[in-house]
Image (cartoon, rainbow, N blue to C red):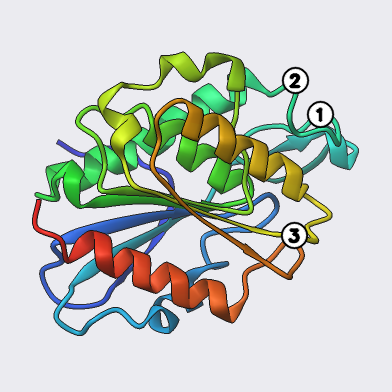
């Protein structure tokens, strides 16, 4: 069976990967955005991981005057905490789910799949990752936020035990730090276990964060399931 998945870039750190990390980019970027980060993570040579960096579909983005750009969903206003594009979120959820299913068909168990993302991609990684049954190995949300917080009860109970890495820049002018922190608190109130980091940066990643990401990935994927 062939799944018609989103176009994506694949990077494998060794032959016969035993784990997969699906990494979603932010608004206006593409799958190439985080591809260079792989060798910077410092993963052990014996850990063969398949990184998948999908390209989001292009669509008009209301906040940017209807300009067509890669996006996981439309953004209608500067307040990211309200009025989410539910139709776009639903469509991207289906696209990301196909990528997860593709890896399962290749022999990678859910317990060996990490769903990661930055900004819009981080929001989608939380939204999709916490809806999985069986749960994933982990979820990584960088400079992101919780979509549809009024529907937090829809998350799968078992998925709430998924290890989550969240990080945010305290000077972020795009996704305010307060929004990321409130998302963290809502998820913790729902029972999620979160490793939280904040950094003196804006809407980007920094070397210290990359080190923490690599350490977290290593701890998740070198643990026996």
Mark 2 is surrounded, within 10 Å at the Cα level, by few (under 14), some (14 to 19) or many (20 or more) other residues, namely few
Q: Residues within 10 Å of mark 3 (few under 14, many from 20)?
A: many
* Secondary structure found at label 2: loop
Residue 104 visible within the image: yes
| Residue 48, quarter of the rendered image | bottom left
**Tag on residue 95?**
none
Specify the quadrant of the image occupied by residue 2.
top left
From the image, state whether disc 1 or disc 2 is nearer to you: 2
**Which residue is most to the right?**
65
Camera-side residue of 220 and 10? 220
Residue positioned 65% across, 44% down in the render? 181
* Nearer to us: label 3 or label 2: 3
Q: Residue at x 39, y 83 (%)?
A: 39
Q: Label for residue 83?
A: 2
Residue 170, disc: 3
Picture coordinates of residue 70, whole percent (x, y):
65, 47
Percent coordinates x, y for residue 36 in the rendering:
49, 78
Q: Secondary structure at mark 3?
A: loop
- Mark 1 or mark 2, earlier in chain: 1
Q: Is residue 152 above or below residue 159?
A: above
Q: CA distance from mark 1 to mark 2?
A: 7 Å
Ranked by sequence position, the earlier of labels 3 and 2 is 2
Q: Which of pointers 3 and 1 indicates the residue nearer the eye?
A: 3
Q: Gap between marks 3 and 1, in whole Å? A: 24 Å
Work out whether residue 123 or residue 199 is closer to the camera in this orientation and state it: 199
Q: Residue at x 23, y 67 (%)?
A: 49
Mark 1 sits on what residue?
Answer: 76
Q: Nearer the viewer, residue 151 or 17?
A: 151
User: Is the residue under label 2 in contact with that under label 1 (CB below 8 Å)?
Assistant: yes
Q: Earlier in the sequence, mark 3 or mark 1?
A: 1
């Amino acid at each position: 069976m062939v799944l018609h998945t989103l176009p994506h870039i694949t990077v494998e750190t060794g032959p016969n990967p035993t784990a997969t990390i699906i990494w979603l980019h932010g608004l206006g970027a593409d799958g190439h955005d985080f591809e260079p980060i792989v060798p910077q993570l410092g993963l052990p040579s014996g850990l063969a991981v398949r990184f998948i960096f999908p390209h989001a579909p292009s669509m008009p983005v209301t906040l940017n005057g209807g300009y067509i750009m890669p996006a996981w969903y439309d953004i209608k206003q500067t307040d990211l905490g309200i009025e989410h594009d539910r139709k776009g979120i639903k469509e991207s959820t289906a696209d990301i789910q196909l990528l997860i299913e593709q890896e399962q068909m290749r022999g990678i168990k859910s317990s060996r799949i990490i769903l990661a993302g930055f900004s819009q991609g981080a929001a989608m990684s939380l939204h999709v990752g916490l809806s999985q049954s069986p749960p994933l190995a982990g979820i990584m949300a960088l400079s992101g936020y919780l979509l549809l917080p009024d529907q937090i009860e829809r998350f799968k109970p078992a998925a709430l035990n998924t290890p989550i890495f969240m990080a945010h820049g305290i000077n972020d002018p795009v996704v305010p730090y307060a929004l990321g922190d409130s998302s963290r608190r809502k998820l913790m109130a729902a029972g999620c276990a979160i490793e939280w980091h904040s950094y003196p940066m804006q809407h980007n990643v920094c070397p210290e964060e990359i080190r923490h990401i690599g350490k977290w990935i290593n701890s998740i994927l070198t643990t026996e399931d």
